[in-house]
Image (tube, rainbow, N blue to C red):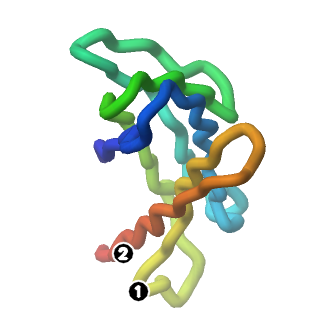
Amino acid sequence: LRFAVNNTGLSRDRLVVTLNRMNLDRLGFVIRLTEYEIDGNATPITAEPVTIVLDTFQRAILNLSVEAPSSWPVPLPAEVEFLVQVTTPDDVESGVLRVTLQVTN
C-alpha cells in the first residue's frame, strides 16, 4: 500500500509516523513501513516511529507492507483494520489514516 503525507504549512516541518496495529500482530499479521520517498529519493525504513522532515508544500510517499497470517481463527473476520498516525513531535497537529482490509478466502 502507498500513501502520502503533505506539509501544507508555510515552514519546514518534522512529522512522526507510527503504526497502531490494533492487535493484528497477535493474529499473525506483519504490518510495517518499508520506505518513504521525497522528491524521487527513496529512504528505507528500519524502525518505528519514523521521523520525516518536509519543506513547505513538500510531500512524502510511504510504502506500507501487510502480510496476512497463513492460518486464521474461525470464523473468519469480514474485515480487519489498523491505523497510521502522523503527528508533529510536540503533538500539536496530528492525522490518522484508518486502513480497512477485507478478508476473503
Q: Badges 2 and 1: C-beta atoms under 8 Å apart? A: yes
As displayed, is residue 79 above or below residue 57?
below
Residue 78 image label: 1
Residue drawn 30% across the image and 74% down it: 105
Q: Nearer the viewer, residue 24 or 89?
A: 89
Q: Quadrant of residue 29?
A: bottom right
User: In this view, which residue lies farthest toward the right?
Assistant: 90
- Label 2 sits on what residue type? Val
Residue drawn 47% across the image and 68% down it: 98
Mark positioned earlier in the residue sequence (2 or 1): 1
Q: Quadrant of residue 21?
A: bottom right
Residue ID for mark 2? 103
As displayed, is residue 71 above or below residue 29?
below
Left or right of 6, for residue 13: right
Left or right of 65, for residue 46: right
- Label 1 sits on what residue type? Ala
